[in-house]
Image (tube, coloured by chain):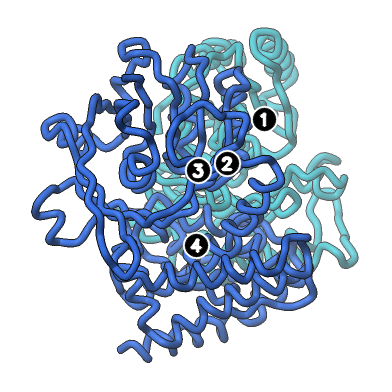
Amino acid sequence: METILILGAGAIGRGFLPWILDLDRYELVFVDKNPRLIETMRRQGFFTSYMAKDQGRLEEKKVTVSGAYLFSDFDIKRIPIPATCFVAVGPRQVGDAVRSLQGYLGPIVLMENDDKCVDLAKATLSQENVFFAIPDVIASNTASKDHLAKDPLALHTEDGVLYVDDRARSVQGQIRYSNPEELERQWIAKTYLHNTPHCIAAYLGALLRLEYVHEVMAVTPAKQVVQGAIDEMLRALKLDWSIPHPFLDWYAEKEMKRFSNISLFDPILRVAREPFRKLHLEGRLVGAALCCMRSGFPPVNIMLGIVAALLYDDGSDPDRHIIFAKQFFPPAIIFSYLLGLRSGEPLHSILTENFSDLIQRLEKIKRHKG
Amino acid sequence: MKAEGYHGKSAQALGKGILLFESLVSRNLQYREKETSRDTVTNIDLAIHNLICRELAESNIPVFSEEGLAWEKTQELYWIIDPIDGTTNMISGIPFFGISVGLVERETFAVGAFGMPATKEIFYTAGPASAYRNEARMRVVEKELRKCLIGVCFSSKGGLGPVSRKEEFQVFQELNDSSRGCLRLGSAGCTICYVACGKLGAAFGVSVKSWDVAASLAIAKAAGCDVRVANGDAPENLHFITGKGQMMDQIQERLARVVPRAQWREM
């Protein structure tokens, strides 16, 4: 058996990856920052991942844990040399996570929703054997109450696809190795047709005080905003990118179905976390809105998503100061200093001038649910 | 601590001050010299002073400002503001200047907000141990002196006299040669905030004005910096060192030549 090392034992690393790797060939070693998770993985020696198949049918997989370590006490020299290392931590944690791979020269596959992380990892490790991958999947870091009662480490995932830079072609499994053009097409679609509406759904869900993304899609005016955001992005992408329109239409339709999938238990807390990261100038909310503005139209639904993110109130979130900022800084300051828009540029002006109106529209959605 | 409830108020006053700055800066900028040619005031300083004083008035806490009331350290709790710290930079088109709103409680810099419109940076405390630069939390880590840029703040009025000025320059030279370099940015508030966010490794100042550093030292402290202060030669003046770990002593040791009788205290 060869070893696969997985940094980040969350939704993608623990829930999704074991389904696409050839587990007859590989044993899995996990590293994570969560002491309780690692302790339970060591004690149990396994966990259960449920994959949502067609028509809500769930398939179960019991995954053997060959090793589980905290980042703080992990030493790569003490495990068999991994055939490949997958990194499935958040973009902000990539720098720290890959430092634990110092001296490792095998392929490293990064799945952090940000292609810039590849450059960061290459610079941190002074090696070029680092590759970008796109998990086209919704995976949850938790499971239904029934499944958690059987196994506290249980989680749910979709039957998704992992697109990996074809220069990393060494791992055996159901991996879609892709050339740069295919990877870029998937990346654009994932960023704007998945990430953008997905986090808008989550921020609306947080306002509605719901737990899972599929519950948001059952609230008609919230679903309309999510659909509206997808339509805005479709329009912008068709105008801006030379990506075949049937592919974009297919992708958008797939996402709307995904968000409504009641088998996924996709937690709002997971999708909405770190709102400032999602509000980054080049990111899935402000970046998406700018993309629409460049195409010549103001994206009302994405702007609702931006304001909903600014209202995100989770006291345990690393970006919980967003509430402080929203409460005390004028909107014009938030949009220019905290989100990085230039004062006076069209999106800055539209957001500032319509801030109160956008908040009122969100309040209306809240009242609809109530 | 009474100051604890005023992090939002200082951020709010700063935000309004920045918006006023942005609306005024493109218009006719008028300035005049105060006591020396290096000490200037503009119509923008005065407009921001008035706005922030009005904003803070509702807190019923006295406000001391570079452009306002006579200095009196008798209050337990007071606001201390500088409408523009680094006015000379501003009128020279150099981006290192900022609006400073701080709150002092029992001689401790407790709350701070500092905004630099030209670089689009705001620094602010949201609690005693939480400070931010724009959207990002700041957490200072200890570095070696030789791997740091050091910020230096000289008094605009010639420090403590010609002899100590000479000593100041010697300390500047020594630290310049034993680090990645010494910089004098021309705004104490900006210099200290750049330590808080890690752009600079440490900063020190001799005989600086309290209104220049009140907000930024509160920010540095909340970001995890060590902050050491000593009383200056006038009630409104002080000496300071900020950084992290061993370099504090290394800088203090050198400053003993400039201010030998300084009674340093940790903040």
Q: Are marks 1 and 4 on the same chain?
A: no
Q: Nearer the viewer, mark 4 or mark 2?
A: 4
Q: Which mark is residue B213?
A: 2
Tag 4, which chain? A
Task: State the residue position of label 4.
Answer: A325
The chain letter corresponding to blue is A
Would you say the residues marked 4 and 2 are in contact, meaning their CB atoms lie under 8 Å apart?
no
Residue assigned mark 1: B153
Tell whether label 2 touches label 1 (CB within 8 Å).
yes
* Chain letter corresponding to the colour cyan: B
Q: Specify the subunit that label 1 lies on.
A: B
Nearer-the-camera pick, B119 or A119: A119
Whichever of callouts 1 and 2 sits on the residue coming sooner in the sequence is 1
**In the image shown, does A158 or B165 lie closer to the viewer?**
A158
Q: Is residue B237 visible?
A: no
Q: Are marks 1 and 4 in contact (CB under 8 Å)?
A: no
Residue B183: where, in percent of width, then height? 72, 25
Question: In the rendered view, does A343 fall on the left or right side of B11?
Answer: right
On the same chain: label 1 and label 3? no
Residue A112 is labelled as 3
**Does A107 appear above or below A75?**
below
Residues at marks 1 and 2, CA–CA distance in whole angstroms: 10 Å
